[in-house]
Amino acid sequence: MKEQKVFVSYIDEDVLAAQQINKKFAVVAISIFLSLIILPSLVWGAFTLFSPDIIDDLDFDTGENRAKAEMPEEVDLSTITAKLESYYNDRVPFRSILYTFQNDLFLALEKPYTDHIQPFLTDLFYSDWEGDTSHLEEESHLDINDLFGEETEETETLPDVEIGDSGDKNCDHTLKDSVLSHASCSEFGQVRKKCTKCGYTELHYTEKISHREVLISTTQPTCTSTGKQVFRCSICQQEIVKTLAKTAHNGSLVKTVAASYEDYGYSLYHCKTCDIDYRTNITAKKIDTSYFAPQIKGSVNRGVIIGRYDWLFYTGNDSLAYYQGTNVLSNAEMKEYVDVLNELQSLCDQKGIQLAFMCMPNREIVYAEYMPTYTVSTPRRLEVFTEYLEKNSDLNYVYPLEEIKAYKPYFQTHYKHDTHWNSVGAFIGTQTLYRELGLPSVNILDLKVTYTMRRTGDIFGIGGLNPSDYPNDYAYTIHYKTDVTYKTESSLSNGNLTITTSSNATNKKNLVLFGDSFRGAMCEFLSKDFSRCTVVHRDMLCSNAGVPVTSYNSTMVSEVKKADILVITSVERYDYNIVNQAKELIKILKSS
């Protein structure tokens, strides 16, 4: 009988004990982990059932200025996990408290860093820093006295010389004059010069003679408006209007302010006649060119740049690329844009609609002196594009960067802590649009402008910043056409507000304007300048990404088709949306 071999496994008792301890530890660890995940939901559910009032106190608005992520309606395996995570993260129990605690902790840690560590490091490594500051050029090249207001009188120029018989091109012409007609106060004179050798002829024009002016009426100028004298020629009966210059203000000195890093130097006067405060003796603002490290709160795609002297800037929608000049359009891209705009222009011409486009400058380009130290390439995207338009089209395209910069010595044109322009910036942009359309415009320096200091800003929540850590800001009131009254009709479609106003304005044209949130500050001025005005949000045509709406609002379509003036606007960081809106308006006008 064969002998069977028996194998006996010997296990060290110490190893077995260690394995058992590890198993127990793993069970405890997993239990704790599951408790951390499940317990908050159980507690939150208990509060919801038994103490709903507590939920109202715990689930408060954190001021993030964004909509919560929604449950995905369609299953896409490549994105479903991320979307579900976003949905849960926006609804996690005690989120408001945790989010606030996190921001408070970051702010508490940030203060010693920004107050002590960052200045030390900056001084250590960048004390001798000399960077390119050409993009901080502060002054506008425009003369503020020539921007808006009364149109200058046009002087009539002589017509060009006209060639008649071309004669012999090799002839050294001997020209003899013959008067065809003598000049009058209404017609140019004509002189024909003919070569006595080959018959070559030129037609020359001579200046008109002076009118025999008879004064009809006089409107005296004031310190805020020009006057005029109206004459009639006793020979040709033509009416001649001559502008009388404004008179000087009857001003008394209020204060003198020295130039600083936050304001220009100036002397402030108050006019006893027109009750307007005005500045004279303007001196340039100081520009801080020291190294200032970029610091972003929130994400690069949707966050806040901490600027100099309490200025805050938005990073969303590629704002940094626009500022740094890294997203300039190619010639092919610009041609594609212009082709669309030209197609809309052609349609509007056929229907007798005056068309204009306006792109509002980004805040960080207007107030580049308060941005941190970034590498910047110029000219930037919109400067290149507007130059391309001037050379390759006859479109009315407004980019009022220089106009707004021209008024910076007199007013702050954008909020410090908000992504938008204020009422002053909106007024200057609106007047620039009027000038491009050939409409009367008004110089804001001829108006009474008052202000209050208050805390404003949609940017705090984006970066999780505490508004109380920042100073109050200017909120202007422009006393414009106070004799004009208007009635407002508002309608809401898919969450987008359309505002239509009717007024007793002398301009009886019907204006329709499309745009983003920047259009809001323009509404009051537009409403006082047109007897009928409709201001529509861009999303009534297409989304921010250019996706067309499924159907057009019938009221909006009706307003577009009966418009006398059609304007498409966008802030600079959404400049491509001007083209997207134009594509949809082409569809609307082609359907009529």
Image (cartoon, grey):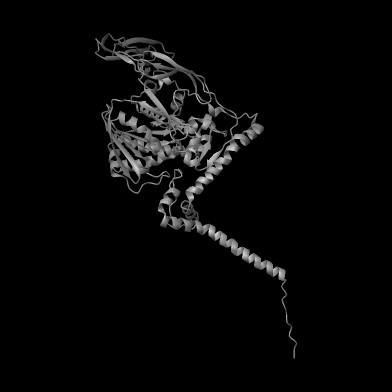
> What percent of the width, then of the height, locates residue 169?
43, 18
Which residue is located at x 47 percent, y 48 percent?
A: 96
Residue 1's place in the image compared with 186, above or below, is below
> What percent of the width, then of the height, locates residue 283?
50, 19
Q: Is residue 34 left or right of residue 192?
A: right
Tell me if I can see residue 378 in this picture: no
> What percent of the width, then of the height, locates residue 160?
38, 18
> What percent of the width, then of the height, locates residue 459?
47, 38
Q: Is residue 365 left or right of residue 199?
A: right
Residue 524's place in the image compared with 148, above or below, is below
Residue 209, by quadrant, is top left
| Extreme residue in the bottom direction | 1
**Which of these two is toward me, 508 or 186?**
508
Residue 395, by quadrant, is top left
**Which of these two is toward me, 188 or 578?**
578
Residue 296, by quadrant, is top right
**Quadrant, the N terminus:** bottom right
**Quadrant, the C terminus:** top left
**Which of these two is toward me, 198 or 322?**
322
Which residue is located at x 34 percent, y 39 percent?
A: 536
Residue 231's place in the image compared with 486, above or below, is above
Count of labels in the image = 0
Tell me if I can see residue 254 in this picture: yes
